[in-house]
Every structure is written in C-alpha cells, then in structure tokens.
Image (spheres, grey):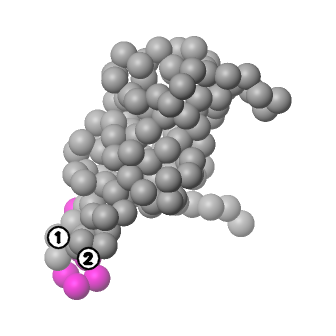
Amino acid sequence: MQLDLVTIVVRDYDEAIDFFVGVLGMELVQDAASLSTDGRAKRWVVVRPIAAQTGILLAVADGEAQERALGQQTGSRVGFFLRVDDFDVALARMRAAGVEFEGDPRREDYGQVVVFRDLYGNRWDLLGP
C-alpha cells in the first residue's frame, strides 16, 4: 500500500504549476484535459518532487466552499513537508523567488527546518539533513 496523491486546491492551474515546478523544483508528471463529474471541462494536473512516488494533484477551486479553503487546507497548521537533499540551495532558490518564510531556519534532531507558505498561504516545512 502507498499514498499515491494528495490534493491541493489552487486558484489557477498555470500559476500553481509555475510555483510547484519553477519555484519548488518539482516535476510536472501530468497535465491532461479532463471532465468534472458533471461534465465540465477541467485539467488533471499532477506534480511531485523529483524521484518521489507520492504526487500532488493541483485542483482548481470549484465553488465558494473550495475557494474559502485556498491556503487553509490544513486549518493553518503545517500540513506539507518537503524534504530536500541540499537545504541551503533550496532555501536560496526559494528566497530568490520571493517565497514567504516564517522565521529563520533552525536545527532540530531530525535536521534543518524552516516554515514557508506556498502561493496560496498553505504552511509547509522545508526539511534538510
């Protein structure tokens, strides 16, 4: 058994792809035309960290309830954890791209960590060795 995908509700497919691929360094696994359960056009967009098995389905908000969930998918808690091999390189790339960080990186028993927000406000841990 494995966790295949998690969904992040986004405002726009292309801006989300730009952030997750261009800023965070993930790979675009799939971007295909699709239909909603009621027949409306949408896209099936999946990104994932390089060499990872679990991907992220980027799903455009559909309706007011989903729009309200933008940036609050985990109730303001850190809900996503991005582990990188080279913490300093990832941190520098993300800072240069204007990613919002909460405080300075710190060392914990499990490695380096700093909280950042994605382009919608969801909180993530950037983790390194």
Task: Give the quarter of the image for residue 35.
Answer: bottom left
Residue 41's label in the rendered image is 1
Looking at the rendered image, the quarter that the C terminus falls into is top right
Instruction: Provide residue 89's location: percent of width, then percent of height.
Output: 53, 14
Q: Give the magenta range.
A: 33-39
Instruction: Estimate the x, y position of residue 105 in percent, counting from the top left.
Output: 61, 21
Residue at 29% in and 36% down: 18
Question: As shown in the figure, which amino acid type bears the numbered disc 2?
Answer: Ser
Q: Which residue is more in the foreground, 30 or 111?
A: 111
When asked about the image quadrant of residue 86, the answer is: top right
Q: Is residue 47 left or right of residue 17?
A: right
Label 2: which secondary element: loop
In this rendering, does residue 64 appear at all? yes
User: Local crowd at mark 2 within 10 Å, few (<14), some, or many (≥20)?
Assistant: few
- Is residue 44 in sight in this rendering? no
Number of numbered discs: 2
Residue 64 colored in magenta in the image: no
- Circle 1 — which element? strand
The amino acid pointed to by label 1 is Ala
Percent across and percent down for residue 123 are 49, 44
Residue 68 drawn above or below residue 115: below
Q: Is residue 107 above or below residue 54?
A: above
Q: Are marks 1 and 2 in contact (CB under 8 Å)?
A: yes
**Which residue is painted at 77% across and 28% down in the image?**
108
| Residue closest to the far bottom | 38
Q: Work out which residue is located at the far left of the displayed protein and give it.
A: 40
Residue position marked by numbered label 2 in the rendering: 36
Q: Nearer the viewer, residue 19 or 119?
A: 119
The numbered mark, 1 or 2, whose residue comes first in the sequence reads 2
